[in-house]
Amino acid sequence: MAMESPFKAGILKGKVALLTGGGSGIGYEISYQLGRHGASIAIMGRRSQVLQAAVDSLRSHGIPAIGLEGDVRKREDAVRVLESTIKHFGRLDILVNSAAGNFLVAAEDLSPNGFRTVIDIDSVGTFTMCREALKYLKKGGPGKDISNGGTIINISATLHYTATWYQIHVSAAKAAVDSITRSLALEWGTDYNIRVNGIAPGPIEDTAGTSKLGPEEMMSTRQHMPLFKLGEKWDIAMAALYLASDAGKYINGTTLVVDGGEWLSKPRHLPKEAVKQLSRAVERRSRAALVGVPKSKL
Protein backbone atom coordinates (compact mmCIF):
# COMPACT_ATOMS: atom_id res chain seq x y z
CA MET A 1 0.00 0.00 0.00
CA ALA A 2 1.42 3.39 -1.03
CA MET A 3 2.18 5.92 1.65
CA GLU A 4 0.31 9.19 2.09
CA SER A 5 1.82 12.05 0.14
CA PRO A 6 4.21 14.23 2.15
CA PHE A 7 3.22 17.23 0.00
CA LYS A 8 0.51 19.74 0.88
CA ALA A 9 -2.79 19.11 -0.88
CA GLY A 10 -2.91 22.46 -2.71
CA ILE A 11 0.64 22.80 -4.04
CA LEU A 12 -0.58 22.67 -7.67
CA LYS A 13 -3.82 24.62 -7.13
CA GLY A 14 -4.90 26.41 -10.28
CA LYS A 15 -2.44 24.53 -12.50
CA VAL A 16 -3.37 22.50 -15.56
CA ALA A 17 -1.45 19.37 -16.59
CA LEU A 18 -1.53 17.44 -19.86
CA LEU A 19 -0.15 13.90 -19.78
CA THR A 20 0.51 11.64 -22.74
CA GLY A 21 0.11 7.99 -21.81
CA GLY A 22 -1.65 9.25 -18.69
CA GLY A 23 -4.47 6.72 -18.75
CA SER A 24 -2.62 3.72 -17.36
CA GLY A 25 0.42 2.58 -15.38
CA ILE A 26 2.91 5.18 -14.22
CA GLY A 27 1.22 7.86 -16.34
CA TYR A 28 -2.11 7.38 -14.58
CA GLU A 29 -0.52 7.49 -11.12
CA ILE A 30 1.15 10.79 -12.01
CA SER A 31 -2.20 12.10 -13.31
CA TYR A 32 -3.89 11.06 -10.08
CA GLN A 33 -1.28 12.58 -7.78
CA LEU A 34 -1.05 15.85 -9.71
CA GLY A 35 -4.85 16.01 -9.52
CA ARG A 36 -4.94 15.18 -5.80
CA HIS A 37 -2.60 18.11 -5.23
CA GLY A 38 -4.78 20.67 -6.98
CA ALA A 39 -4.14 20.39 -10.73
CA SER A 40 -6.76 19.95 -13.43
CA ILE A 41 -5.88 17.00 -15.67
CA ALA A 42 -6.02 16.36 -19.41
CA ILE A 43 -5.00 12.88 -20.54
CA MET A 44 -3.98 12.04 -24.10
CA GLY A 45 -4.00 8.45 -25.33
CA ARG A 46 -4.83 6.16 -28.23
CA ARG A 47 -7.31 3.83 -26.51
CA SER A 48 -10.69 5.45 -25.88
CA GLN A 49 -11.84 2.85 -23.32
CA VAL A 50 -8.67 3.24 -21.25
CA LEU A 51 -9.00 7.03 -21.44
CA GLN A 52 -12.61 7.01 -20.33
CA ALA A 53 -11.94 4.65 -17.43
CA ALA A 54 -9.05 6.86 -16.27
CA VAL A 55 -11.12 10.06 -16.51
CA ASP A 56 -14.02 8.44 -14.63
CA SER A 57 -11.61 7.33 -11.91
CA LEU A 58 -10.03 10.79 -11.59
CA ARG A 59 -13.43 12.48 -11.45
CA SER A 60 -14.58 10.04 -8.76
CA HIS A 61 -11.81 11.54 -6.60
CA GLY A 62 -13.03 15.06 -7.29
CA ILE A 63 -10.32 15.83 -9.83
CA PRO A 64 -11.32 17.94 -12.87
CA ALA A 65 -10.31 15.73 -15.80
CA ILE A 66 -10.80 15.24 -19.53
CA GLY A 67 -9.63 12.52 -21.91
CA LEU A 68 -8.44 13.37 -25.42
CA GLU A 69 -7.84 10.70 -28.02
CA GLY A 70 -4.64 11.13 -29.98
CA ASP A 71 -1.36 9.63 -31.13
CA VAL A 72 1.88 11.44 -30.24
CA ARG A 73 3.34 10.28 -33.57
CA LYS A 74 0.89 12.55 -35.42
CA ARG A 75 1.56 16.27 -35.26
CA GLU A 76 -2.06 17.11 -36.07
CA ASP A 77 -3.18 15.06 -33.05
CA ALA A 78 -0.74 16.91 -30.81
CA VAL A 79 -2.02 20.28 -32.06
CA ARG A 80 -5.68 19.28 -31.63
CA VAL A 81 -5.20 17.82 -28.14
CA LEU A 82 -3.36 20.92 -26.94
CA GLU A 83 -6.01 23.22 -28.42
CA SER A 84 -8.74 21.18 -26.72
CA THR A 85 -6.91 21.36 -23.38
CA ILE A 86 -6.67 25.16 -23.62
CA LYS A 87 -10.28 25.44 -24.75
CA HIS A 88 -11.47 23.40 -21.78
CA PHE A 89 -9.18 24.62 -18.99
CA GLY A 90 -7.90 27.96 -20.34
CA ARG A 91 -4.19 27.32 -19.76
CA LEU A 92 -1.38 24.75 -19.62
CA ASP A 93 1.27 24.66 -16.90
CA ILE A 94 2.63 21.11 -16.87
CA LEU A 95 3.31 18.73 -19.76
CA VAL A 96 4.23 15.14 -18.87
CA ASN A 97 5.44 12.96 -21.75
CA SER A 98 4.92 9.38 -20.60
CA ALA A 99 3.66 7.70 -23.77
CA ALA A 100 6.06 4.88 -24.66
CA GLY A 101 6.37 1.65 -26.59
CA ASN A 102 8.43 -1.35 -25.54
CA PHE A 103 8.97 -5.08 -26.09
CA LEU A 104 11.85 -7.49 -25.64
CA VAL A 105 13.73 -8.38 -28.81
CA ALA A 106 17.25 -9.45 -29.76
CA ALA A 107 18.96 -6.78 -31.88
CA GLU A 108 19.26 -9.04 -34.94
CA ASP A 109 15.55 -9.89 -34.79
CA LEU A 110 14.40 -6.25 -34.65
CA SER A 111 13.32 -4.82 -38.00
CA PRO A 112 14.19 -1.23 -38.89
CA ASN A 113 10.44 -0.52 -38.79
CA GLY A 114 10.19 -1.90 -35.26
CA PHE A 115 13.16 0.26 -34.23
CA ARG A 116 11.61 3.30 -35.92
CA THR A 117 8.24 2.80 -34.23
CA VAL A 118 9.73 3.07 -30.74
CA ILE A 119 11.86 6.08 -31.74
CA ASP A 120 8.74 7.70 -33.22
CA ILE A 121 6.69 7.26 -30.05
CA ASP A 122 9.32 7.97 -27.42
CA SER A 123 11.73 10.41 -29.03
CA VAL A 124 9.92 12.14 -31.89
CA GLY A 125 6.63 12.03 -29.97
CA THR A 126 8.21 13.72 -26.98
CA PHE A 127 9.74 16.44 -29.16
CA THR A 128 6.48 16.97 -31.06
CA MET A 129 4.45 17.40 -27.87
CA CYS A 130 7.03 19.81 -26.43
CA ARG A 131 7.22 21.85 -29.61
CA GLU A 132 3.46 22.19 -30.03
CA ALA A 133 3.01 23.01 -26.32
CA LEU A 134 5.62 25.79 -26.32
CA LYS A 135 3.26 28.67 -27.08
CA TYR A 136 1.04 27.65 -24.15
CA LEU A 137 3.83 26.90 -21.66
CA LYS A 138 6.09 29.89 -22.26
CA LYS A 139 6.11 32.94 -20.02
CA GLY A 140 3.30 35.29 -21.02
CA GLY A 141 1.34 32.37 -22.54
CA PRO A 142 -2.40 31.88 -21.83
CA GLY A 143 -3.07 32.48 -18.12
CA LYS A 144 0.61 33.25 -17.39
CA ASP A 145 2.34 36.48 -16.45
CA ILE A 146 5.40 37.70 -18.28
CA SER A 147 7.87 36.17 -15.81
CA ASN A 148 6.52 32.66 -15.21
CA GLY A 149 6.64 29.79 -17.67
CA GLY A 150 5.45 26.22 -17.24
CA THR A 151 7.31 22.96 -16.84
CA ILE A 152 7.88 19.77 -18.85
CA ILE A 153 8.61 16.31 -17.43
CA ASN A 154 9.83 13.58 -19.79
CA ILE A 155 9.57 9.99 -18.55
CA SER A 156 12.79 8.21 -19.46
CA ALA A 157 14.64 5.07 -18.27
CA THR A 158 18.05 3.91 -17.05
CA LEU A 159 18.47 1.23 -19.75
CA HIS A 160 21.06 3.20 -21.72
CA TYR A 161 23.31 4.17 -18.80
CA THR A 162 25.27 0.98 -19.44
CA ALA A 163 23.55 -1.46 -21.81
CA THR A 164 20.47 -3.63 -21.40
CA TRP A 165 19.81 -6.99 -23.05
CA TYR A 166 17.15 -7.00 -25.81
CA GLN A 167 16.38 -3.29 -25.42
CA ILE A 168 18.42 -1.67 -28.19
CA HIS A 169 15.41 0.26 -29.54
CA VAL A 170 14.21 1.65 -26.21
CA SER A 171 17.75 2.38 -25.01
CA ALA A 172 18.35 4.48 -28.13
CA ALA A 173 14.95 6.18 -27.81
CA LYS A 174 15.41 7.10 -24.15
CA ALA A 175 18.98 8.31 -24.73
CA ALA A 176 17.44 10.69 -27.27
CA VAL A 177 14.75 11.74 -24.77
CA ASP A 178 17.43 12.62 -22.19
CA SER A 179 19.25 14.68 -24.79
CA ILE A 180 16.00 16.47 -25.73
CA THR A 181 15.44 17.23 -22.03
CA ARG A 182 18.86 18.88 -21.71
CA SER A 183 18.64 20.82 -24.99
CA LEU A 184 15.19 22.22 -24.24
CA ALA A 185 16.19 23.03 -20.66
CA LEU A 186 19.04 25.11 -22.03
CA GLU A 187 17.12 26.84 -24.83
CA TRP A 188 13.64 27.17 -23.35
CA GLY A 189 14.79 27.71 -19.77
CA THR A 190 16.79 30.69 -21.04
CA ASP A 191 14.32 32.11 -23.57
CA TYR A 192 10.89 31.19 -22.20
CA ASN A 193 11.33 30.41 -18.49
CA ILE A 194 10.22 26.80 -19.01
CA ARG A 195 11.85 24.17 -16.81
CA VAL A 196 12.44 20.84 -18.57
CA ASN A 197 13.36 17.74 -16.57
CA GLY A 198 13.10 13.98 -16.80
CA ILE A 199 12.37 11.05 -14.53
CA ALA A 200 14.07 7.68 -15.07
CA PRO A 201 12.07 4.97 -13.27
CA GLY A 202 13.64 1.68 -12.32
CA PRO A 203 11.55 -1.54 -12.29
CA ILE A 204 8.09 -0.59 -10.98
CA GLU A 205 5.55 -3.13 -9.76
CA ASP A 206 2.13 -3.49 -11.43
CA THR A 207 3.16 -1.85 -14.69
CA ALA A 208 3.29 -2.99 -18.32
CA GLY A 209 7.06 -2.65 -18.08
CA THR A 210 7.39 -5.37 -15.46
CA SER A 211 4.74 -7.68 -16.92
CA LYS A 212 5.89 -7.44 -20.56
CA LEU A 213 9.59 -7.48 -19.80
CA GLY A 214 9.81 -10.72 -17.85
CA PRO A 215 8.64 -10.39 -14.24
CA GLU A 216 10.16 -13.67 -13.00
CA GLU A 217 13.56 -12.73 -14.37
CA MET A 218 13.33 -9.28 -12.84
CA MET A 219 12.25 -10.57 -9.47
CA SER A 220 15.19 -12.99 -9.43
CA THR A 221 17.51 -9.96 -9.42
CA ARG A 222 16.02 -8.63 -6.19
CA GLN A 223 18.86 -9.97 -4.06
CA HIS A 224 21.24 -7.65 -5.94
CA MET A 225 19.08 -4.53 -5.58
CA PRO A 226 20.14 -2.07 -2.89
CA LEU A 227 16.61 -1.57 -1.57
CA PHE A 228 15.59 -5.21 -2.21
CA LYS A 229 12.23 -4.47 -3.80
CA LEU A 230 10.50 -3.17 -6.87
CA GLY A 231 9.49 0.46 -6.78
CA GLU A 232 5.90 1.68 -6.70
CA LYS A 233 4.14 3.93 -9.17
CA TRP A 234 3.69 6.26 -6.19
CA ASP A 235 7.47 6.79 -6.06
CA ILE A 236 7.49 8.10 -9.62
CA ALA A 237 4.44 10.29 -9.02
CA MET A 238 6.09 11.86 -5.96
CA ALA A 239 9.15 12.67 -8.07
CA ALA A 240 6.86 14.30 -10.66
CA LEU A 241 5.13 16.32 -7.92
CA TYR A 242 8.48 17.55 -6.67
CA LEU A 243 9.62 18.60 -10.15
CA ALA A 244 6.27 20.16 -11.11
CA SER A 245 5.83 22.15 -7.89
CA ASP A 246 7.68 25.16 -6.52
CA ALA A 247 9.84 22.70 -4.56
CA GLY A 248 11.65 22.08 -7.85
CA LYS A 249 11.79 25.71 -9.03
CA TYR A 250 15.60 25.64 -9.44
CA ILE A 251 15.74 22.18 -11.05
CA ASN A 252 16.23 22.38 -14.81
CA GLY A 253 17.81 20.00 -17.31
CA THR A 254 18.20 17.04 -14.99
CA THR A 255 16.83 13.50 -15.20
CA LEU A 256 15.94 12.26 -11.74
CA VAL A 257 16.67 8.55 -11.34
CA VAL A 258 14.05 6.85 -9.17
CA ASP A 259 15.19 3.24 -8.96
CA GLY A 260 16.56 2.56 -5.47
CA GLY A 261 20.04 2.39 -6.99
CA GLU A 262 19.08 -0.58 -9.18
CA TRP A 263 21.04 0.53 -12.26
CA LEU A 264 24.22 0.60 -10.16
CA SER A 265 23.71 -2.96 -8.96
CA LYS A 266 26.08 -5.80 -9.77
CA PRO A 267 26.19 -9.33 -8.36
CA ARG A 268 28.67 -9.91 -5.53
CA HIS A 269 31.43 -12.18 -6.79
CA LEU A 270 32.68 -12.72 -3.24
CA PRO A 271 30.71 -12.83 0.01
CA LYS A 272 31.59 -9.98 2.38
CA GLU A 273 33.09 -12.38 4.96
CA ALA A 274 35.45 -13.79 2.32
CA VAL A 275 36.61 -10.26 1.49
CA LYS A 276 37.24 -9.55 5.18
CA GLN A 277 39.26 -12.76 5.52
CA LEU A 278 41.26 -11.85 2.43
CA SER A 279 41.95 -8.35 3.82
CA ARG A 280 43.13 -9.82 7.12
CA ALA A 281 45.43 -12.28 5.31
CA VAL A 282 46.94 -9.45 3.21
CA GLU A 283 47.42 -7.37 6.35
CA ARG A 284 49.19 -10.28 8.13
CA ARG A 285 51.50 -10.80 5.14
CA SER A 286 52.30 -7.08 5.06
CA ARG A 287 53.16 -7.07 8.76
CA ALA A 288 55.29 -10.20 8.38
CA ALA A 289 57.18 -8.62 5.52
CA LEU A 290 57.92 -5.59 7.68
CA VAL A 291 59.34 -7.62 10.61
CA GLY A 292 63.02 -6.90 10.93
CA VAL A 293 62.91 -3.79 8.74
CA PRO A 294 64.68 -0.94 10.56
CA LYS A 295 62.35 1.86 11.73
CA SER A 296 64.35 4.33 9.69
CA LYS A 297 63.27 2.49 6.54
CA LEU A 298 59.55 2.58 7.44
Image: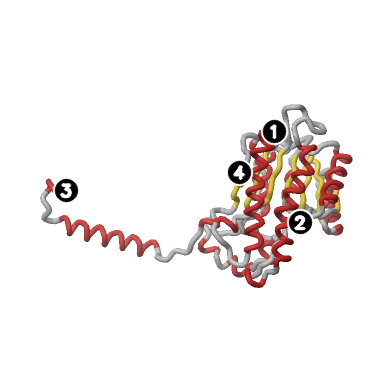
- Looking at numbered disc 4 in the image, what kind of residue is underneath it? Thr
Measuring from the top left, give residue 238's x and y in whole percent.
66, 46
Measuring from the top left, give residue 38's x and y in whole percent.
77, 39
- Looking at numbered disc 1 in the image, what kind of residue is underneath it? Asp
Label 1 neighbour load within 10 Å: few <14, some 14-19, many 20+: few
Kindly identify which residue carries mark 1.
191
- Looking at numbered disc 3 in the image, what kind of residue is underneath it? Leu
Q: Which mark is residue 298?
A: 3
Measuring from the top left, give residue 64's x and y in whole percent.
84, 43
Earlier sequence position, callout 4 versus callout 1: 1
CB-based contact (under 8 Å), mark 4 and mark 2: no
Q: Quadrant of residue 88?
A: top right
Mark whose residue sits in front, 4 or 1: 1
- Looking at numbered disc 2 in the image, what kind of residue is underneath it? Ser
Residue in view at x 47 percent, y 64 percent: 267
Kindly identify which residue carries mark 2.
24
Residue in view at x 66 percent, y 51 percent: 177
Mark whose residue sits in front, 2 or 3: 3
Earlier sequence position, callout 4 versus callout 3: 4
Q: Secondary structure at mark 4?
A: loop
Q: CA distance from mark 4 to mark 3?
A: 49 Å
Q: Is residue 282 left or right of residue 242?
A: left
Residue in view at x 40 percent, y 65 percent: 270
Q: Is residue 35 above or below residue 140?
A: below
CB-based contact (under 8 Å), mark 1 and mark 3: no
Q: Secondary structure at mark 2?
A: loop
Q: Is residue 38 left or right of residue 5?
A: right
Q: CA distance from mark 4 to mark 2?
A: 25 Å
